[in-house]
Amino acid sequence: MVNSSPRTPRSELSPFRERRQSQVRVLLLGAVGAAALFGAASSLALLPAHAEAPVNQGLVFASPPSFADMVDHVKGAVVAVKVNVVEKADAENPGAGEGLPPGMPPLSPDDPLYRFFKRFGGPNGMPNGGPLPHSHKGQALGSGFIISSDGYVVTNNHVVDSATDVTITLDGGKSVPAKIIGVDKKTDLALLKITEGGPYPYVQFSETMPRVGDWVIAVGNPFGLGGTVTAGIVSARGRDIGSGPYDDFLQIDAAVNRGNSGGPTFNAKGDVVGVNTAIYSPSGGSVGIGFAIPSEVAKDVIDALRTKGTVARGYIGVQIQPVTQEIAESLGLKSTSGALVAQAQPNTPAASAGIASGDVITGVNGEKVEGPRELSRKIAALGPDAKVDLTFIHNGADKTASLKLGQLPSDKEAKAETVPEKAAKTSLSGFGFSLSPANSVAGAGKEGAVVTELDPEGVAAQKGLRAGDVILDAGGKPVAGPEDVVKALDTAKKEGRHAVLLRVKSGDNMHFLAISSDPS
């Protein structure tokens, strides 16, 4: 089935698209005079009521800034991106191809209608009993911008994901074919090339980043309407919205809607400071919270895609997490700065340099690291084979290690461990969970204790423990079985320590969490 209506790519709404609000509060500000808003002269000539002169005679108002000249200069480089796609009904695209009535968009498994059709519909969950299609055709509409006279175009990866062909609509309305040069899913960027000869008008990335409060202008193709300009300011920088490992978004209040994805955010000089990517919206429309990939990130990724067709990132081989206040107290740290190493993977640069589980990485090449995302971005940006000096805390002492970065490998699929119902259990009812020896649970390994039962309202669950997790260390000591976890909790309580640090394996991932030694 061909859907002629614009499709909003999945990441358009980022992780916020599932959120709903039962009530919207509107704050109305008191009316403010034009003089206050636009900087009018402080002394105004007041005309008597019977005066015959126009009411605005003698008044001087300062005009708000106009971006018309700048827009005229850059609009020729902003394009609409139309993509024909084939969506598959699989685990990566839940809800697609569920055999819903014509015109109804795919539903998320969290949607009540999805569960209704699954329960009360015909075979395969279809409302009319028809067969469940494996895939269907559709269209995606987004935005982009030209960065060279020979027709290279920047857009979002999610705009061209699953594309069978791509068409670029230029500012004058002409449509030209394009091909995908490369994509980078981790930053949601893609580089296209117009296959029809140029030259084309183009824009460039800014060499300086905007400050919070600076004017920005978003240009794009919202709702498929064509070239649209909105203005606002940079509301915040360094936003992490949970969309990827290198989140470092600009937050802007210039209106960004569906179809703006991949379009540019300009500064007042007409240079690109960001690539519009996601919005926060309870309603699906702009509420003044949009997110753009900053130019300092985008231009490096685009350069790599243009020259190599792919992005190679630096890699040290550690699983890291934030240092919470409880974890800092458990490790005797003075602050929560840095990235806690949950695991140093074997045969990696970090392991070779002596970095181990429980260490806290605090700096890269003399620059302080505040948290794990900052560390990830710094290491990735340096690239493979770069030589770096890492500062870290090991057993309470500051250390420095020099190492050569590897190349970030492809993503691995994490598989959840299965927990049989008949495994021998040790109950820690006060904490809200039960444990079994790891060697009694298939796939859990030979060491540690597996969480076989978990009270979702218990202390452990509230701290992040999950059924199927394997506890490998408790209180800094290896766990051979459930009794070692019990002993660590009892010892901490007797010694007056408020929390016990656990090193936990969840699927293929390692992390630390701290639980209270006394749940009462």
Image: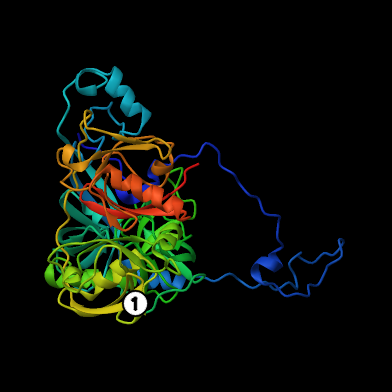
Res. 122 image quadrant: top left
| Residue drawn at the location 32% of the way across and 47% of the way down | 485
Name the residue beneath numbered marker 1: 398
Colour setting? rainbow
User: Where does the image place residue 46, in percent across and percent down from the top left?
Assistant: 83, 69
Q: Is residue 15 visible?
A: yes
User: Where does the image place residue 37, in percent across and percent down from the top left?
Assistant: 66, 66
| Vertical placement of residue 519 versus 154, above or below | above
- Judge by depth and name the residue closer to the eye, 95 or 61: 95
| Residue drawn at the location 27% of the way across and 34% of the way down | 425
The quadrant of the picture occupied by the N terminus is top left
User: Where does the image place residue 140, in percent across and percent down from the top left?
Assistant: 26, 47
User: Where does the image place residue 221, in percent across and percent down from the top left?
Assistant: 35, 55
| Vertical placement of residue 327 versus 448, above or below | below
Instruction: Say left or right for 171 vs 255.
Output: left
- Mark 1 secondary-structure assignment: strand
